[in-house]
Image (cartoon, rainbow, N blue to C red):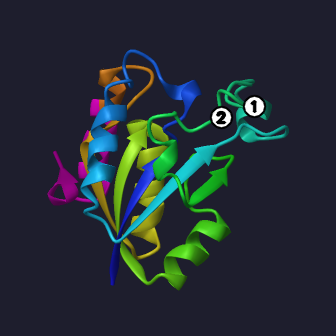
Amino acid sequence: MARALIVIDVQNGFITPSSRHVIQKIKKLLESKKFDIVVFTQFVNVPGSPFRKIKNWHKIATAPETDIVPELKPFAKTVFKKNVYSSFTPEFERFLKKNKISQLYLAGIDTECCVFKTAVDAFEKGYEPFLLASYCASHESSKFHQMGVALFGRLITPKNIIM
């Protein structure tokens, strides 16, 4: 079974002083070619999304906010667009099954939201998620990142947190 690195939502609109540091870390990880498969996700806040309807949040809707950061774009050969927290769209799940992927190594932004929701969905669907904590961040603050790491340990298992 293949191991896949899932780079979640490292997009211009999510880069802040709290999240900027992961770009170079993820770039070095990608350059190391340690993973059989690399997949990127790209959040787009489309009209009618729950973010717009329920939260009245309209950011990350168009380029350049939705664009994957320039430093990582050359590595983004396989990109799955999504408009919810989880990466588990039907297309994403078909890709995992087609490529016989059983282990998902998660990196990206936001640890407490999209990364965490993807991890929980992976776990519930029978995939083994690993949180690459040093390659994740929250665009909000390091406090939220730490909360996401703690919740991953609680809901999934601390042994799958890789610092």
How many discs mark residues in the rendered view?
Answer: 2
- Magenta range is 146-163
Q: Callout 1 environment at 10 Å: few (<14), some (14 to 19), or many (20+)?
A: few
Q: Position of residue 4 (x, y in %)?
A: 37, 67
- The disc label shown at residue 62, or none: 1
Residue type, label 1? Thr
Q: Position of residue 158 (x, y in %)?
A: 18, 54
Residue type, label 2? Thr
**29 or 87, nearer to the observer:** 29
Q: Is residue 117 visible?
A: no
- The disc label shown at residue 66, or none: 2
At a point 18% along the width and 51% down the height, the residue shown is 162
Indicate the secondary structure of the residue bearing disc 1: loop
Q: Position of residue 84 (x, y in %)?
A: 64, 47
C-alpha span from label 1 to label 2: 6 Å
Up the image or down, 5 lies above or below 96; here it is: above
Up the image or down, 130 lies above or below 154; here it is: below
Q: Position of residue 111 (x, y in %)?
A: 38, 39
Up the image or down, 128 lies above or below 73; here it is: below
Rendered image quadrant of residue 6: bottom left
At a point 55% along the width and 51% down the height, the residue shown is 41
Image quarter of the C terminus = top left
At a point 49% along the width and 47% down the height, the residue shown is 74
